[in-house]
Image: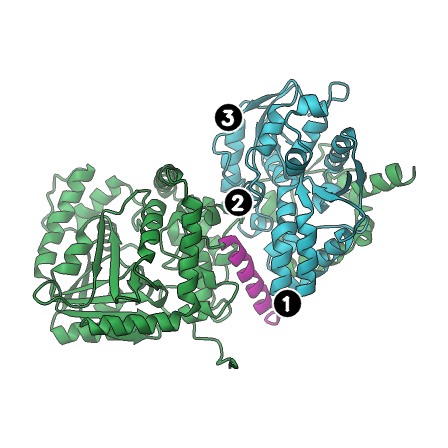
Chain colours: A cyan, B green
Amino acid sequence: MRIALFATCIVDAMYPQTAKSTVKILERLGHEVIFPAGQACCGQMHMNSGYMPEALPVVENHVRAFDTDDYDVAVAPSGSCVASVKHQHAFLADRLGKPELKERATAVGKRTYELSQLLVDVLGITNAAEQLGSYFPETITYHPSCHGMRLLKLGDRQLDLLKTVGGITVNELPEADQCCGFGGTFSIKNPDVSSAMLDDKVNNICSTGASACAGGDASCLMHIGGGLSRTGAKPKTLHLADILASTMEETVAL
Amino acid sequence: MTQVFLGMPAGGLGNLVETEPFPAAAHRELGNTQMRKNLRHATHTIRDKRLRVVGELPDWEQLRDAGSAIKNSAMFNLEERLLEFEKNFTARGGVVHWARDADEANTIVRDLIRETGSTEVVKVKSMATQEIGLNEYLETQGIEAFETDLAELIVQLGHDKPSHILVPAIHKNRTEVRDIFLKEMPDVDPALTDEPAKLAEAARKHLRAKFLSAKVAISGANFALADTGTLGVVESEGNGRMCLTLPETLITVMGIEKVLPHTDDIEVMMQLLPRSSTGERMNPYTSMWTGVTEDDGPQNVHIVLLDNGRSRVLSDSFGRSALNCIRCSACMNVCPVYERTGGHAYGSTYPGPIGAILSPLMTGIEVEKNNSLPYASSLCGACFDACPVKINIPEILVHLRGEDVDSQRDKHKIPTQMDLLMKGGSWVLGKGKNMKLVEKALPLGRLAAGKNKKIKKLPGIAAGWTQSRDIPAPPAQSFRDWWSAEKESK
């Protein structure tokens, strides 16, 4: 299969390792990965902050970059960005009265998958150790990010993949389904409420005794990781893709 | 048929606006540790209960779809449904009054009470009358209103404001309730303990006298059935039913969006509502009345159909599904923001996620200063998941943020920091090559992060982030540049 990688802006600029891991996993399965060079961002930050006209060029750019016959499916290592591509782009086009953009955005959305969605639903991965050679000898816990859980209905796809990684121990996170408090510009517009939500998330993670909290969204992980770092807590944050890409020979360091 | 736009319908009046910007109110409320403890306990208890009873129904999702479809169809030709209701309600001996806004509704109710010669009324728990500030208005007109719902009574005796639409005193624990009763309830037993049964008994004794003497009752309504002219109230205590049956005059104030097309529709609604609100399979007291029944119950039956901004909501194609709300409160019970700030932080009668959309939709975001509420959400989506009539609250929040930003554009000459961030971001993220250019500066960020590879303090609006979070040092090279170097050169 020819798979187009949508790296997402935050992974591209801040966590390139996660995009490399995504490429590694897919190539390991024998697929060809391409990177549409025009891509930048899903525009979620602009839309969620209410800046619709400013979001338009970002959304148009994404649609331009991915509305091609050059690939079979697109994948992004982020539930939130995929949810934006699948749902929010059409909403913006509607709101700004752009029916042609809506049609193209909807078509792109249909071909775009979140990483665990692609691995489980399309590529039939049920055992990460056996099928991907994943190996990560650490105790982790797992935060299911809101948009993956509620907008994409990912269910246990990410957690099930993690549980089948070789050498791993997965401890359950109390109140896992509760938002970490990031919410994009919510964290700077309502810093007190956001911080109160983050406090609870950090405490719950620490209570598991895990050395890392895994998740499928780099932005939420940056938020949680920022909180853990500030409080001096031991656990790190790590993207699902990085754990799946980790092998016996090349084990990812915490 | 040609459609003529008659202008935007008027915004709602009354208790629909934030009293101060949400972040400031939230800052204060977050410091109230007792309230936060009470609220955490209460919301988590209701959450778990709701999940249990919802989980019992294999067709819960289909019920939600049906509920949503029923409300959509009612809103689709609301005018016809309301006229049909008026015809049937009137035919059965009731009197219909139409109120454009809070002021009109208050005046109508006052005049109806004055006609009876009474200066006291008993009240059934009602959101509509909270919204229009009826009790406060009646007080200025020399009429005393007694709340009979236990939680509303606690709020009224405590000179407080409701903080939840279903459990108005959710921010108080039983010891605090006992203290309020001891201080404010005449003839209360001074040895009253904080045992729930004892508190209920004290309230019962206090209220019984009012039920037996009151000549006028005021209620809200959970629904009105267009095809029969029937009104319905859904409650848990039976106090509502006392008000609805004992007095001679019954005045109901109801938002126009509460009309349901058909009697059959309550089959769906009465499965959705109790499970979503109190986490019960069946509602304890469901009272329905159709006009006047000779020698039985109230002989003067009135309804005030209240617009107060609802037509305005209906005219907003992206926001109108907010009118589908059946006031179950599931959205606030699951909301991580509400759980931490409580309802008072929202200012409006309608707190929580639904309040954050309904209040500014009803008043208009630009007409009044009511624009911080749509930002009071991390857009986690728990509210949408819990909503029994599938109101896409996060999407409407985003829509309203858009309305707010657009309405601010011409107001300030100098762009705000957020404006600049978004405009700059639009350029950078609008093209792959622009992003590539900006990413060349990543090493500068590494420099700023220093030896421990953490950025601990940022200026301006970004200081909100660094108040409780570090930012990791950026990488030396973006993925994009790595890809060009590694993959494309081969």
Labels in figure, total:
3
The location of residue B380, given as percent across then percent down, is 52, 46
Earlier sequence position, callout 1 versus callout 2: 1
Q: In which quarter of the image is residue B197?
A: top left
On the image, numbered disc 3 is attached to which residue? A207
On the image, numbered disc 2 is attached to which residue? A194
On the image, numbered disc 1 is attached to which residue? A97
Question: Which chain letter matches label 2?
Answer: A
How crowded pointer 1 is (Cα within 10 Å; few <14, some 14-19, many 20+) is rated as few
Q: Does residue B400 show up magenta in the picture?
A: yes
Question: Which chain letter matches label 3?
Answer: A
Amino acid marked by disc 1: Gly
Amino acid marked by disc 2: Ser
Earlier sequence position, callout 3 versus callout 1: 1
Q: Is the magenta stretch mostly helix, strand or loop?
A: helix
**Separation of disc 3 and disc 1 at Cα?**
49 Å
Kindly state the secondary structure of the residue where label 2 is placed.
helix
Q: Is residue A122 visible?
A: yes
Q: Does residue A33 show up magenta in the picture?
A: no
Do marks 1 and 2 both belong to one polypeptide chain? yes
Foreground tag (3 vs 1): 1
Q: Are marks 1 and 2 in contact (CB under 8 Å)?
A: no
Q: Is residue B380 above or below residue A100?
A: above
Q: Is residue A136 above or below residue B100?
A: above
Q: What stretch is highlighted in magenta?
A: B393-416
Q: Quadrant of residue A51?
A: bottom right
Q: Is residue B387 visible?
A: no
Amino acid marked by disc 3: Ser
For this rendering, which residue is in front, A43 or B424? A43
Question: Which chain letter matches label 1?
Answer: A
For this rendering, which residue is in front, B424 or B66? B66
